[in-house]
Amino acid sequence: MAAQFGRLRKGAVNTTVAAVVVAALAASQAPGVITDDAGRRVTTGTQPSPDTPAEDSATGNSPYYTDLPPLNSPNPSPSADTPVDPGVTEAGIPATVLDAYKRAQAALQQAKPGCNLPWELLAAIGKVESGQARGGRVHADGTTISPILGPQLNGNGFANIGDTDNGAYDGDSSYDRAVGPMQFIPSTWEWAGRDGNDDGKKDPNNIYDAALAAGHYLCRFGWDLSTQGDLDRAILSYNNSQDYLNLVMRWLEYYRKGTHEIPDGTGTVPSDRSDDTAGANPTSTTPATPSSPGTPTPPSSPKPGDNGGSPSPEPTPPSTTPPGTTPPTPTDTVHHLEDAGTAKLSAMAGDTFAEKISARAETKAGKAVAKVRVRFTIIGATDATFSTGEKYATVLTSGIGEALAPALKAGENTGEFVVRVTVVGRTIAGLDYKATVTERAADTLTRTGDTALTCTPGGEFADQVEVKATYKDAVADKVAATATLIKSADDPAENDKGPYFKDADGKAVRTLTGLTTDAKGLLKLPKLYADDTTGTFLLRINTAGGATLTVELKVAAAETSPSPTPAASESASGSASASPSA
């Protein structure tokens, strides 16, 4: 347990580990014990389990920050053109870090919808584990500017977890350390790691990768995090400590009330830790001391193995930045966004938009800014998404400062919606792009057969009418259509005689609405019947988009064989009677 491990001496830890082994053997077949994705045992209870080894948690029960949420209520997220309240930075979440949490939540909604993972839970754990990646000190791709490492888990006041990765993740080939903004130990990351930013790597030091991994870790047993029991179990599986559970729940409730986005690198780095006996008790009601308004708190001097300090074994070179200031990042230099040649955005329902949105980040002087995160968000009552299946996308600007959004895919809802483009970590005005979804259409209709359509009065047509719809030579599926028996080629009014369809009650109808082509663009009409009127009639089929086809129907009496003439009958009779006398 993290808080308890922080206060144990080495001898006590060794004794505890021995007891854990005995307890594990005794409990191996006990009820309430399940295994995780790596085959490890995890208790399903809602209280810390003393027989759960530290290495079976996400963090190895490493120390964590114990700072409490501010007493003042958090602020809601500001709009793109509203400056962030320069209040306590403790209450805000750095832009890239917040984006990673929300992106992870969206991914889990698709992969494990029954888990009901809230991004606020990831934010609460991220706050307690690393102070939101040391106040959002991350590069544009989400990787921490310097690695975040927990203390060496060598049994000296902490759990005793020998090296499992040969130093690949934590740079330590003797003992394991918790790594990254979500503080995974290497043995857990090995199976729990995810690629959250689609760069082909699973990096525990990247907030997008770590947040997605944490989401999957918390959802791995089919837990429903909307229920308190499963939520407690998930948090305890991350770090097996009741104090840890209480603290994460405090931050979770705080973030659920609302928070605001702050620029990367301006967040407050927590000061109190669970392995510091002089630090605050997680159950204390004393609020964390806020920093001066608008002034981010610089990182405190790290202790040996401090997960809030730089782990680099090399001495830090002298800074050329004046004391008390933070060097500007590329994001800080962005003054405005410019359209980068986006054409008109229009597509039929169900289709992918041919045009993509492109925006350029520029300085006040109009110079392009590279490696800046730009967010594209779909706004409005629409079921359109990006090609990723999500309603938002975050893209890094290129060397010429341009960010190209993923392709837009229209849903079935027609009408207009807006795609808003903003810079992650800045509150400058965004760009709005209007997009239009039109109804599905066809420009050509053809019959699938060429058999003449004929019928006798009062009968039924032997063949049903089937047509195929296309649009620009491609199959036109799900296109609305109508079919009407019209008076003439020049008069499209509904005919009051001749062929007809039947409704559900068997009554004659001569107009059908609500028709739709199938996935192959085909539309097969119901059977046609004829009344007693003979002649040639017309059936007209119309679709959205203007495609029209007129089909000819004929109703005529059945042809009969001609009767023999009287002379022919007499001749035949005479021949027959003369034959015997001959």
Image: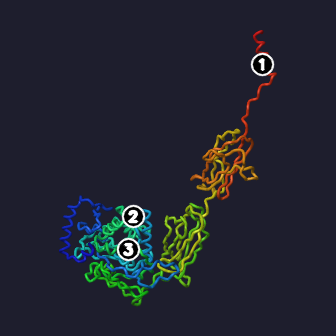
Image side of residue 561 versus residue 89, left or right: right
Q: Residue at x 63, y 58 (%)?
A: 441
Give whichever of 141, 392 is nearer the camera: 392
Identity, as a three-letter code, of the amino acid under mark 1: Ala
Q: Tell me the residue that label 2 is attached to.
A: 115
Identity, as a three-letter code, of the amino acid under mark 3: Leu
From the top left corner, tell me how far across and down residue 77 is, in percent.
Answer: 47, 77
Q: Which residue is drawn at 52% across and 65% down?
A: 385
Q: Tell me the residue that label 1 is attached to.
A: 572
Q: Is mark 1 on a helix, strand or loop?
A: helix
Alpha-carbon neighbours of circle 1 within 10 Å: few (<14), some, or many (≥20)?
A: few
Q: How far apart are marks 2 and 1 (CA)?
A: 95 Å
Is residue 371 depicted above or below 222 in this figure? below
Is residue 355 visible from the viewing direction of this image?
yes
Alpha-carbon neighbours of circle 2 within 10 Å: few (<14), some, or many (≥20)?
A: many
The mark found on residue 252 in the picture is 3
Q: Quadrant of the C terminus?
A: top right
